[in-house]
Image (spheres, coloured by chain):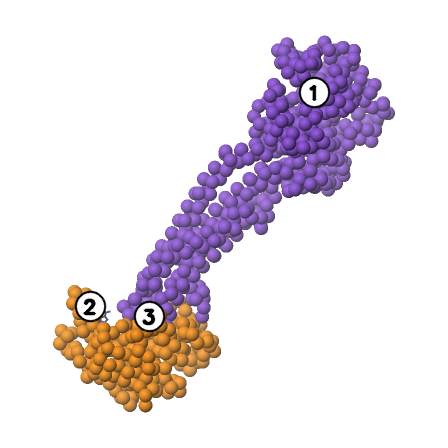
């Protein structure tokens, strides 16, 4: 199995409001294979979202290398990274991040609006149907329940036919039974479309369904129990 | 989903704010378009008669502008008159002789060419007599030449055409002195048709009515010129109305002036004096006093004018044309056959004591440049500022929404949108406001114009329709788009700089 994601000697720190640097991540090695599904757990403030942002190219690392599908994203221009993200990565945000001005189907279409691939209008409908929102195409996020919004966000993340899906606590806002079905939805879809999946979760029961579970606190050499205090 | 679609969604999402911004822009654009249209209407109204078909107007000394307003536009207060002999100065010897014999007057007038006749060189001189009204409209006494020699239209090559009837003719057994032709607007407003009679009122629209009626023999097609607002009557008939004959007794002072004028007019000729006009050759006037107005009939007119006069039916039987000393003209429309002669002629006339020659186009342009132009420029500047304010409105509205948008932009960036893409979306949004505002403003202004088109046409003779646009209107859209682009720069820059990581709520 070749690695889709290959991280080496990654370091990321933030400038603190009161000045000085706060080192959040220090990962010597982390890999995800093609088609692999990984669950990541870790304490709050441990840097999980930061790691996903780094992989997605939304943040730049202080040092180290992130290769995705053989491409060193850090070496790309910003524009190149944007295009790469549009074509390679799907992202389900912790807070969904749907655009309130757009209907459900338009939000899904936005997921493929910025890539170079053809805009396949039918795919947006297919995806929404697959997540059970066949009759909610023209609802705005404000008119959808939280669980429904989450499913729109999932459909959107897959719209651009990504190779890697990053899901940041995709089940945090729904009741446990819904959480189960949402997670199965993501996993099934990823399997069908041969998409690698990295899911962050707090929920051990959810994590337990995955073949591979990573504890960020173990990979990360920064000790947040002391850093946070 | 196209960027324009995305921009449109954003526009709709902030519906109230977008609407108000667009509306204020529409008002600004509407004002500008309205002012441009008014500008267009006014300059069109004024310059339409740059194609009057004549190049000089001759009238009594005074304001050349007022002469132009009177004779070209039939506007402003009536002015003084000129003696008929002044008009005769534009005619060759044979025509003058025929007038002397038909109307009666100093035989010396028949002995020479008019002083200015050589300058005419194939052109024409058409007399106008103003002073009466038909309803609100000026009655213009003139000769049938008015309809045969004057042309109009953009290339000054269109003849007058008649929607009904014909031009009035010179007196003949079939054609009385009292024939009239109405401009299109007059006929419509006064609701009269060919065959009907109207009775001019004296002096001003509410003045005393004349007893003498004129039979309408023709109605002109609309020309879009002031002629649409005039009621033309045969000059001879005009003279024969009560009070239109110039009393022949003059006070000594006026005689002195006349002598001076005549002496100046032709040095070799002895001045025309009253004694001379009383001489037998001048067809000793047989004066009758009638309602305080002196009707003068000359032997000459009895014997020479029209042999058929006696068989003439109706009212004309009692009428004889006025003698030359009794005649006055308000102004004379001149077209020089060779335009090179115009300046020389204008100088010659202006050097005289009585008359002045004005170039209507020059007067119109002066008026435009002096008063109307600066006024409209000021108006335009004010409305331009209104537009700029509206553009600032776009800036404020978009910039204020940037706080809410930061997250939207970050999300789009996270979905793979480039910085330039989100920047374009902001600019498109500003363009949308500009485009909709401009179109709405244009529609607003032109609706207003159409609603008032009747009034505009009444006042100016210029016809405006919904799609009548002024020259500069085409510039409004690019101008507003330019303003919108400038207004969008700041928010667009903010969008460009929006940081993805810190604006994503996750
Ligand atoms: N833009 C930033 N500037 C400064 N510090 C930041 C920034 N983003 C994150 N941090 C800090 O980095 C640390 C890791 O944050 P991160 O959001 O990655 O945590 P997390 O593991 O996703 O936590 P949670 O499970 O609560 O979502 C936190 O201590 C946070 O304060
Ligand atoms: Mg997080």
Q: Is residue B492 visible?
A: yes
User: Of helix, strand and loop, which one carries label 3?
Assistant: helix
Q: Residue at x 58, y 44 (%)?
A: B453
Mark 3 touching mark 2, by CB under 8 A? no
Q: Position of residue A73 (x, y in %)?
A: 31, 76
**Disc 3 and disc 2 on one polypeptide chain:** yes
Query: Which mark is drawn over residue B85?
Result: 1
Assign the C terminus of chain B to one quadrant of the image. bottom left
3D distance between C-alphas at marks 3 and 1: 92 Å
Q: Which of the chains bears the disc numbered 3?
A: A
- Report crowding for label 1: few under 14, some 14 to 19, many 20 or more residues within 10 A (C-alpha): many
- According to the picture, the residue beneath numbered tag 3 turns out to be A78
Q: Which of the chains bears the disc numbered 1?
A: B
User: Of helix, strand and loop, which one carries label 2?
Assistant: strand
Give the chain coloured purple: B
Ligand 1, what quadrant?
Answer: bottom left
- Using the image, determine if residue A175 lies above or below residue B261: below
Mark 2 C-beta closer than 8 Å to ligand 1: yes
- Using the image, determine if residue B385 lies above or below residue B91: below
Q: Earlier in the sequence, mark 3 or mark 2?
A: 2
Describe residue B277's horizontal placement relative to residue A85 as left or right: right
Mark 3 C-beta closer than 8 Å to ligand 1: no
**Disc 1 and disc 2 on one polypeptide chain:** no
3D distance between C-alphas at marks 3 and 2: 21 Å
Give residue A176's quadrant in the image.
Answer: bottom left
**Disc 3 and disc 1 on one polypeptide chain:** no
Give residue A224's quadrant in the image.
Answer: bottom left
Instruction: Say which colour chain A has.
Output: orange
Q: Residue at x 52, y 42 (%)?
A: B39
């Amino acid at each position: 199995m070749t690695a889709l994601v290959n991280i080496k000697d990654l370091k990321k720190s933030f400038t603190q409001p009161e000045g000085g640097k706060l080192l959040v991540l220090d990962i010597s090695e982390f890999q995800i294979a093609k088609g692999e599904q990984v669950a990541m757990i870790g304490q709050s403030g441990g840097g999980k979202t930061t790691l996903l942002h780094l992989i997605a190219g939304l943040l730049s690392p202080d040092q180290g290398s992130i290769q995705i599908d053989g491409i060193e994203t850090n070496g790309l221009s910003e524009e190149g990274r944007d295009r790469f993200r549009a074509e390679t990565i799907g992202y389900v945000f912790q807070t969904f991040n749907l655009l309130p001005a757009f209907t459900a189907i338009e939000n899904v279409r936005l997921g493929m609006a910025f890539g170079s691939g053809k805009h396949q209008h039918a795919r947006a409908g297919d995806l929404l149907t697959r997540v059970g929102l066949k009759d909610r195409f023209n609802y705005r996020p404000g008119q959808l329940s939280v669980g429904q919004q989450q499913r729109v966000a999932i459909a959107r993340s897959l719209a651009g036919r990504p190779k890697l899906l990053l899901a940041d606590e995709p089940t945090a806002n729904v009741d446990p039974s819904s959480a189960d079905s949402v997670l199965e939805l993501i996993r099934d879809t990823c399997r069908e479309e041969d998409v690698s999946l990295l899911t962050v979760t707090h929920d051990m029961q959810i994590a337990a369904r995955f073949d591979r579970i990573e504890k960020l606190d173990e990979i990360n050499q920064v000790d947040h129990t002391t850093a946070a205090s | 989903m196209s960027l324009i679609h995305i921009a449109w969604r954003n526009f709709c999402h902030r519906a109230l704010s977008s609407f108000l911004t667009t509306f204020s822009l529409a008002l600004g654009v509407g004002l500008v378009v309205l002012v441009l249209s008014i500008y267009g209407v006014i300059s069109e109204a004024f310059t339409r008669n740059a194609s009057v078909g004549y190049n000089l107007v001759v009238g009594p000394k005074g304001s050349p502008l007022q002469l132009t307003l009177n004779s070209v536009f039939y506007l402003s207060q009536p002015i003084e008159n000129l003696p008929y002999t002044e008009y005769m100065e534009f005619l060759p010897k044979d025509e003058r002789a025929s007038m002397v014999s038909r109307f009666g007057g100093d035989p010396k007038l028949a002995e020479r060419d008019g002083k200015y006749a050589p300058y005419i060189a194939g052109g024409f001189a058409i007399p106008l007599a103003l002073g009466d009204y038909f309803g609100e409209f000026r009655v213009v006494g003139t000769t049938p030449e008015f309809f045969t020699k004057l042309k109009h239209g953009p290339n000054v090559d269109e003849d007058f055409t008649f929607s009904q009837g014909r031009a009035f003719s010179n007196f003949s057994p079939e054609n009385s002195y009292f024939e009239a032709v109405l401009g299109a607007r007059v006929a419509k407003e006064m609701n009269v048709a060919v065959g009907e009679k109207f009775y001019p009122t004296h002096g001003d629209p509410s003045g005393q009515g004349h007893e003498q009626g004129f039979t309408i023999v023709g109605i002109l097609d609309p020309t879009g010129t002031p002629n649409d607002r005039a009621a033309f009557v045969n000059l001879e008939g005009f003279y024969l109305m009560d009070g239109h004959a110039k009393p022949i007794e003059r006070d000594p002072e006026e005689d002195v002036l006349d002598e001076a004028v005549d002496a100046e007019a032709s040095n070799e000729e002895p001045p025309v004096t009253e004694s001379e006009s009383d001489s037998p050759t001048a067809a000793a006037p047989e004066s009758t006093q009638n309602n305080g107005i002196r009707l003068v009939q000359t032997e000459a007119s009895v014997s020479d004018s029209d042999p058929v006069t006696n068989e003439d039916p109706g009212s004309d039987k009692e009428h004889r044309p006025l003698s030359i000393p009794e005649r006055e003209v308000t102004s004379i429309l001149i077209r020089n056959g060779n335009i090179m002669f115009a300046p020389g002629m204008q100088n010659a006339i202006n050097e005289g004591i009585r008359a002045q020659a004005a170039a209507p186009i020059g007067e119109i342009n002066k008026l435009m440049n002096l008063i109307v132009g600066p006024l409209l420029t000021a108006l335009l500047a004010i409305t331009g500022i209104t537009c700029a304010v509206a553009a600032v409105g776009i800036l404020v509205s978009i910039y204020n929404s940037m706080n809410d948008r930061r997250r939207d932009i970050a999300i789009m960036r996270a979905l793979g949108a480039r910085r330039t893409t989100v920047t374009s979306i902001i600019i498109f949004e500003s363009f949308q406001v500009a485009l909709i505002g401009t179109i709405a403003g244009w529609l607003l202004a032109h609706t207003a114009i159409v609603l008032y088109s009747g009034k505009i046409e009444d006042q100016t003779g210029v016809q405006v329709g919904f799609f009548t646009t002024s020259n500069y209107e085409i510039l409004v859209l690019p101008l507003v788009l330019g303003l919108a682009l400038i207004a969008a720069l700041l928010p667009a820059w903010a969008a460009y700089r929006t940081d993805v990581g810190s604006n994503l709520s996750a």
